[in-house]
């Protein structure tokens, strides 16, 4: 089985979000980057298929040279090969089309992407890959079992979950729950050493057109101070929520 | 040309987000001076959309079960039939699932988490939240057909009575090789996605045996229950209740956090909520900087009192 895991290189969750160049670019100064958490759940599940069932796991990122440290981390966790498409994509369609070109070239049984990335929160890359390749697709995937050419997978819905069966090839949008938090791996020294020797190929992009361009960013308006209510005075809180905030 | 909304229903009844989405679609249709069309599937109360400015409803009575690929095909067919130039969807799990599939089929530029009506229509500029509510982006869509995903609770419901026509719609739906084996859905529970009020508990509650406090407060308010990440990691509560940057997003009218410190990852995910209340024994807890109202106090004393006071408030106000 060949698995491709799409890895988004995103600012650490504690990063300060600021913009430069007249509020048109994200300010990367002092920002630490991580594997997008949803992608990491997916990568961890892929490791299970590698170790238990002998799957090969490729990881892919569409981005500039700075993302290679994140791809190396994925290799240190245990992926076999890394691919970087050398372009700064402007929108999800460009990302998806670049990944699809690699899928068509290499052929995969399973494509794993995160449900969404924590930077631009688009939530569309896995669906677009599925639509562009004609593969079946399950979003918000919280369980995935594969037997031969068939998968059983669970999707979290609003207020419940649904179990589906589907033939491969399949695209999933991974999220928390797909593996336990305690299954997540911190690369060890041996993994890091091995990752240095694993192949990381850099491919030229297709240069598809962007459909969406983000032209400016804004920060939310500063918030007013909290109104504190004494614990003995809960009636006052209820009255504020009823009369002032009008939410109860 | 027209504007199309995919109005979701559950067990034959339109969801509230469908009405909010129709209101949003109406605003776009007004900007473009055109008609608002809604597409529904297996919906029994289509007429309700007439209260929110829909001019025409296309309704399909198949397939019986939700399938993202098939539903995306329905949205695409409806959009093509009605020459829709803007298609709006909600941010429910199902809509976010099917929308990118439809966007590819329609060759439409697609933007999610849109927080208000387009800033302009030529060029087509929308404001969306990015970095999990830590910032906004202004995006330009340059395709002929455009698709926008509306953030929950960002636009509100706006009445605008019309008398829509309802037309049976029979889209071409291909068979799917993906089959639903089982669905596990609590019927009576308020979901985090749909709830107007969410009550959330953190590690300050000390253990799962104390969750009756959260559950009782939630049921008094008709609210959904949620929790912080460590609470679900330790198995005190199911993963599906974990809210925050790496869990579910919350955009309710009221979010009440009990014994939650207010870490940046937690706040990012709940910040789209309109009003935030925090109950925490530590006055230095970061949540107080993000909240609108707060009580510095022990949850084990404050919450039972709050439930009692809420009950008498409700008795007086009904
Ligand atoms: C990559 C990453 C992603 C993350 N994603 C998320 C996420 O999506 N969601 C999330 O929630 N967290 C997330 N976290 C974790 C986050 O950083 C915090 O660790 C977590 O939110 C803390 O949970 P808590 O507030 O329940 O616990 P604590 O931080 O331990 O806070 C407990 C609070 O309870 C208060 N308290 C104690 N006793 C009482 C009492 N008797 N009455 C009232 N108050 C009391 C304390 O004063 C304290 O403020 C993430 C972390 C990382 C590194």
Image (cartoon, coloured by chain):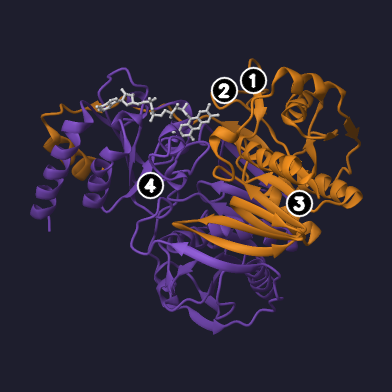
Chain colours: A orange, B purple
Tell me if residue B205 comes above or below residue A31 in the rendering.
below
Residue at 44% across / 51% down in the picture? B155
Q: Secondary structure under badge 1?
A: loop
Q: Which residue is mark 1?
A: A32
Q: Secondary structure under badge 2?
A: loop
Q: Which residue is mark 3?
A: A110
Choose the circle earlier in sequence order: 3 or 2: 2
Is there CB contact under 8 Å for labels 4 and 1?
no
Q: Nearer the viewer, mark 4 or mark 3?
A: 3
Horizontal side, residue B152 vs residue A209: left or right: left
Q: Chain of mark 4?
A: B
Q: Chain of mark 2?
A: A
Q: Which residue is mark 2?
A: A15
Is the same chain shared between marks 4 and 3? Answer: no
Question: Residue A33 at what x, y percent from top left?
Answer: 66, 24
Q: Chain of mark 1?
A: A
How many angstroms separate mark 4 from mark 1 (CA)?
31 Å
Question: Residue B44 at what x, y percent from top left?
Answer: 44, 79
Choose the circle earlier in sequence order: 3 or 1: 1
């Amino acid at each position: 089985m060949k698995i491709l895991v799409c890895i988004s290189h995103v600012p650490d969750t504690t990063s300060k979000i600021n913009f430069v160049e007249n509020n048109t670019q994200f300010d990367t100064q002092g920002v630490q980057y991580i594997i997008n958490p949803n992608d990491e759940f997916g990568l961890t599940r892929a490791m299970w298929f590698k170790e238990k069932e002998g799957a090969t796991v490729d990881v892919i990122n569409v981005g500039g040279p700075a993302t290679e440290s994140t791809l190396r981390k994925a290799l240190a966790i245990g992926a076999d090969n890394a691919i970087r498409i050398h372009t700064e994509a402007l929108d999800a369609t460009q990302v998806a089309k670049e990944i699809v070109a690699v899928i068509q070239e290499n052929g995969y049984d399973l494509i794993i992407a995160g449900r969404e990335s924590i930077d631009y929160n688009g939530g569309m890359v896995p669906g677009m890959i599925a639509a562009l390749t004609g593969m079946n697709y399950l979003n918000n995937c919280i369980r995935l079992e594969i037997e031969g050419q068939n998968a059983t997978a669970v999707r979290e819905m609003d207020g419940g979950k649904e179990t589906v069966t589907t033939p491969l090839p399949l695209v999933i949008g991974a999220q928390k729950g797909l593996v336990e938090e305690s299954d997540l791996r911190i690369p060890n020294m041996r993994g890091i050493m091995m990752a240095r020797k694993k192949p990381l190929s850099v491919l030229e992009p297709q240069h598809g057109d962007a459909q969406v361009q983000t032209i400016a960013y804004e920060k939310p308006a500063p918030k007013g101070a909290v109104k504190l209510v004494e614990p003995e005075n809960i009636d006052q809180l209820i009255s504020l929520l009823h009369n002032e905030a009008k939410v109860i | 040309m027209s504007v199309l909304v995919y109005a979701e229903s559950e067990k034959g009844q339109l969801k509230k987000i469908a009405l909010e989405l129709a209101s949003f679609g109406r605003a776009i249709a007004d900007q473009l001076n055109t008609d608002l069309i809604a597409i529904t599937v297996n919906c029994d109360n289509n007429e309700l959309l007439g209260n929110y400015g829909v001019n025409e409803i296309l309704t399909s009575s198949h397939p019986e079960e939700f399938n993202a690929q098939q539903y995306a095909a329905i949205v695409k067919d409806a959009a093509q039939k009605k020459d829709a130039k803007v298609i709006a969807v909600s941010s429910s799990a199902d809509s976010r699932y099917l929308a990118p599939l439809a966007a590819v089929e329609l060759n439409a530029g697609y933007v999610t988490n849109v927080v208000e009506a387009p800033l302009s229509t030529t060029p087509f500029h929308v404001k969306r939240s990015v970095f999990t509510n830590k910032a906004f982006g202004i995006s330009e869509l340059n395709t002929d057909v455009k698709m926008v995903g509306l953030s929950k609770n960002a636009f509100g419901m706006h009445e605008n009575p019309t008398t829509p026509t309802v037309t049976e719609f029979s889209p071409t739906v291909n068979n799917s090789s993906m089959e639903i084996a089982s669905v596990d859905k609590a019927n009576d529970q308020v979901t985090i996605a749909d709830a107007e009020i969410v009550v959330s508990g953190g590690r300050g509650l000390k253990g799962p045996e104390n969750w009756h406090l959260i559950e009782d407060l939630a049921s008094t308010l008709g609210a959904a229950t949620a929790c912080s990440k460590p609470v679900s990691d330790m198995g005190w509560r199911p993963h599906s209740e974990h809210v925050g940057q790496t869990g579910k997003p919350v955009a309710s009218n009221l979010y009440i956090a009990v014994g939650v410190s207010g870490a940046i990852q937690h706040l990012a995910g709940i910040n789209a909520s309109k009003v935030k209340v925090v109950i925490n024994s530590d006055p230095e807890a970061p949540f107080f900087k993000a909240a609108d109202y707060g009580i510095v106090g022990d949850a084990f004393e404050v919450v039972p009192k709050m439930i009692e006071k809420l009950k008498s408030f409700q008795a007086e106000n009904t």
